[in-house]
Image: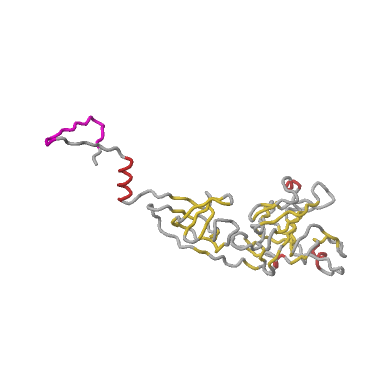
Amino acid sequence: MNKNYMTYPMKNMRITCRYDEASHRKHCIDVTDGLIDYPIDDGGKDTGRDPIYCPCDEMKVTAIRGVGNSSVTNTIWLVSTSAVITPTFTDIAFMTLTHPNDSDFTNIKVGDIFKRGEIICYEGTDGATSNHIHLTCGRGSSSTWKQNSNGAWIMDGNSYKPEDVFYIDRNFTTELWGGYLIWKYLPETSYVGNPVSRNTNVNQIEVLVDNLNARSEASTDSMSYGYLKKGFYDVVAEQDNNGYHWVKVESYWIATNDGWTKMYPKTTTNCEEKLKELEESYPKLIFTCDKTGKYLIYLQKGSQLYLQ
């Protein structure tokens, strides 16, 4: 993704409780002290345990509560490491996930960083009767909670409604049930590049995926012009940097990976190159004639004769 959009963190959206329904009403309805947030419950595709994915370029774990403590529901706080683009603001954003099981936290600690698309945890039943995730979000940072005048535990921070924080990426999330909330879809992504025909006379690379960033330099920190269209491109230059092998096509640099791209070294040459190769690598018969006459050359079966 060439821009740091904040996208919905599950592949299947099935809202089972909105922020203004059932027990969630105490979070934002008739609150006298101003402590509010806007939680939603998502049950995923079915009664199983769907994963929750990192919704932006990077998020850092700022707090974990409840693990191993039966009186406190398991919750993880995450904050973006850079500004994200949401339907209502561009800034640092936070997200909290409640109800994952203890087993989800075996390898997670405060300070860990997740990158876009990596699994953070799964729906769970810690403090709940069925598998789901209780999700809140907002602008800025959050690492704790406070109890409001209704007795509900509220995420401390500048909470926003989830439809104001997350875009829905239709290439990632299937909206089974959006809870009548007005979700906004991810803006169309720009594509660049002009694929060419397969040519065995030059080094080429094939782009296999439709989300490979076309960058200004051979660096993950450089500007992205969008995604490079799938297809074949002539290789202009190559370079190693940031743990990737980079290839320049047209005026763009792309990071290569076995699952993203495939290299095709040239396999044929023109006549002049072929002749030069033969001159340099093939053996020669050097024969000097010291008088006029006829000569016979006898070859045994299987032998070869090269004449220049």
Residue 145 appears in which quarter of the rendering?
Answer: bottom right
Q: Farthest residue toward the top?
A: 300
Is residue 292 one of those drawn in magenta? yes
Q: Which residues are magenta?
A: 291-305
Q: In this rendered view, identify the residue nearer to me: 31 or 1.
A: 1
Q: In this rendered view, identify the residue nearer to me: 283 or 199.
A: 283
Give me the residue at 81% from left, 50% from top: 66
Residue 158 appears in which quarter of the rendering?
Answer: bottom right
Q: Name the chief secondary structure element in magenta.
A: loop
Q: Quadrant of the N terminus?
A: bottom right
Q: Position of residue 31 (x, y in %)?
A: 85, 68
Q: How is the image coloured?
A: secondary structure
Q: In this rendered view, identify the residue nearer to me: 75 or 212.
A: 212
Q: Position of residue 246 (x, y in %)?
A: 52, 53
Give me the residue at 66% from left, 59% from top: 56
Is residue 227 one of those drawn in magenta? no
